[in-house]
Image (tube, grey):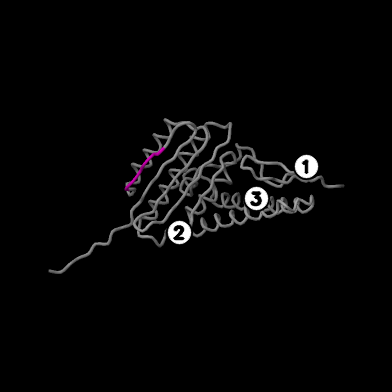
Amino acid sequence: MHNVILMESGLDGTERLIMGTDRLYSEEPAAQRDDRGHSAADEQSGVDPNLRLISLFNHYRHDWMNDIQVLFGYVKLKKYDKLESLMEKIKEKVRRESNVAKLGVPELIVYLLSVQAEVKDLLFEVDMSEEIRLNELPLDVADFSSMCIGLIEAFKRNAQLYADGEQKLALQLAQKSDCLQLNVRYAGEIAVKRLLAELENVKQRHTSAEIWRIERLEGGHAAMHVEVPYFREEVNSCL
């Protein structure tokens, strides 16, 4: 039996290799995927967190196997000119995943790595220009992590109301001298009124944010900027 090597392009512009009729990436029906959110939501809904980790592992195993097979396919088809760009994409993916894994908050790390594994129709990425270790910063790490999860869940829930079309969600973290910045960028159809209400709810529950600004919410695009200041040291002077 001979393997037939085919290449297909996904919504994100990446190519996937199909050998014969066996696809080397996950195509689970949407109804079988869990998109409940972080571990607290798992406990409340009765979802076994171990099953989430298994699902996460399977997703990344499929993802990396696909990259290996695409690399193999380029070599097999003698498309050597595409190898350099593929390797650059793999290096960038490794950098992003490594930065997420070093955030220092296990619950947030697992959640961020789980989003893409659980919601196939939403292209999600986390970007940091440098490593950020939240557990070493002078801020309420638990509150900040919960706020991040709340923001992503708000966008995710309201984006899922529109199953058609391409949807992209990007979370950017930046460590400044006096604060931690969080930027969210979304492209695609979304339930605007519901999203605004949910974002306001997240804001009311997390008062540590000094700046909370929705920069754009129209024409299939949304953008917001949040700044959480570091704790200020109190200086006691003796007179």
- Residue 91 lies in magenta, yes or no? no
Looking at the rendered structure, the number of numbered marks drawn on it comes to 3
In the picture, the disc for residue 117 is none
**Drawn side of residue 68 relative to residue 50, left or right:** right
Q: Nearer the viewer, residue 189 or 30?
A: 189
Task: Give the x, y percent position of residue 82.
Answer: 70, 51
Q: SS at mark 3?
A: helix
Residue 87 located left or right of residue 197:
right
Q: Which residue is mark 3?
A: 63
Q: Residues within 10 Å of mark 1 (few under 14, many from 20)?
A: few
Circles 2, 1 touching at the beta carbon (< 8 Å): no
As drawn, 201 above or below 236: above
Indicate the position of residue 63 as horizontal and vertical percent values.
Answer: 65, 50
- Of residues 143 and 236, the one nearer the viewer is 236
Alpha carbons under labels 2 and 1: distance apart: 42 Å
Rendered position, 104 above or below 153: below
Q: Position of residue 34 (x, y in %)?
A: 56, 42
Q: Amino acid under label 1?
A: Thr
Magenta: main secondary structure equals strand
Quarter-wise, where is residue 204 in the image? top left
